[in-house]
Image (spheres, rainbow, N blue to C red):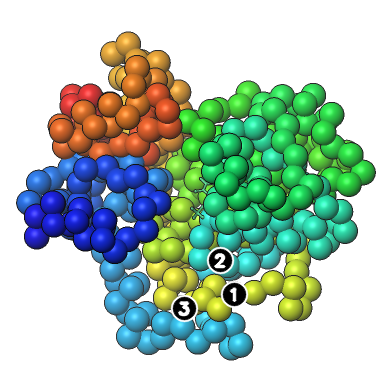
Amino acid sequence: MDFSEIKRMEELFYSNTFTRLPIALKRGDGMYLYDFDGNRYLDMFAGIAVNCLGHSHPAVLKALVEQSRKLLHVSNWFYTLPQLELAKLLVEITGMEKAFLTNSGSEAVEAAIKLARARTGRKEIIAMENAFHGRTLGALSLTWEKKYREPFKPLVPAMRFARYDDIDSLEDKINKNTAAVILEPVLGEAGVIIPGKDYLKAVRDLTLDRGVLLIVDEVQTGFGRTGELFAFQKSGIKPDILCLAKGLGSGFPVGAMLSSGIDFKPGEHGGTFIGNPLACEVAKAVVETIIRDELHINARKVGSYLKKELGDKGFEVRGEGLMIGVETEDGKRKVLELIERSVLTIHSSNTLRVLPPLIIEKKHADEFLQKL
Ligand SMILES: *Cc1c(COP(=O)(O)O)cnc(C)c1O
């Protein structure tokens, strides 16, 4: 099938909402993706920080095949072991107490909003300017970008915004109606914005002092991306609620909301597909592989190498682990130029976002640097 035919099918049958890059992908293997003509691309964006084990990883394939022979879905009317084993694993590696599973990052944020409101009896949630928490109405109400919000107003009421990396701005916004503060440890969609070293700790101290819950959204930073299993662990804090998704399934849709000290009461929340055995077996295999192969440490190593080399080449670069932003004159043009040179990246305005699979090796980093 050729590219013009594929484009034509999209025009005829698919919703207009997505702006596509000009390639149709057919298959993937490790760090590489292949289009319909068999051209090979180095994957430096991992489906938006998702495919942490790259493509067609044997651990993912094994879990998919073995579990799909046994059970795909039975609903949450029954006990199933994979969801309990995944919950146990997530609790152990995060230090949180309870896990609630979801199908996506937005759903993890929705669960967090509901839990924060239900347990505190308060309505307001404070998010950060330039934050991204998802596209469903609740998560969208905590997302800053105007063009995502405007057509859908009125959004969920009582959501407010403080300036990121500015503890005074947050302190001003907290009041007796505040249920929770939600933030990303590194702003992802905003273009890899890293706060000061003590910021997260200051937010934790402030929220504890004022009796407000802290929701940490690690949908993008989680599972080794920033060089630690979870970015909040660098600050030595403990959130009340932790939202996870993207890297968890390495491409299989699955997310989680973890909580400490609070939990849903029977019947307060649910979902038909959430925690299904197939998603949970894949997620377990992904997390076990990250830990066994120390991919968070690899992220730290290859990330530092990339940052240093990019800096030496004269780029303005910032990043934590394999969450790297490179300033360019024109982000969109740079992404298209790199596609011409068989490298896939994404951009947030003029920041080129480099988010490769965590399995990346030095030779792939060198290939990227050379093509850049
Ligand atoms: C991607 C993202 C979300 C939304 O996740 P979806 O799976 O797209 O619904 C939420 N929070 C952060 C920080 C994200 O990067």
- Residue at disc 3, CB closer than 8 Å to ligand 1: no
The amino acid beneath tag 2 is Thr
Residue under the image location 61 percent in, 27 percent down: 195
Residue at the spot x=83%, y=52% of the render?
123
Q: CA distance from mark 3 to mark 2?
A: 12 Å
Contact, mark 1 vs mark 2 (Cβ under 8 Å): yes
**What kind of residue is marked 3?**
Pro
> Would the CB of label 1 be found within 8 Å of ligand 1?
no
Q: Alpha-carbon neighbours of circle 1 within 10 Å: few (<14), some, or many (≥20)?
A: few
Q: Which residue is mark 1?
A: 271
Q: Nearer the viewer, mark 3 or mark 1?
A: 1
User: In this view of the protein, can residue 216 be seen by the observer?
Assistant: no
Q: Amino acid at mark 1?
A: Gly
* 354 lies above or below 143: above
| Image location (x, y in percent) of residue 188 | 50, 37
Q: Is residue 119 left or right of residue 281?
A: right
Task: Say if 113 sits above or below 359 in the image.
Answer: below
Q: Secondary structure at mark 2?
A: strand
Q: Which mark is residue 102?
A: 2
* Image quadrant where one finds the C terminus: top left
Q: Name which of mark 1 and mark 2 comes first in the sequence.
A: 2
**Residue at the location (55% across, 78% down)?**
272
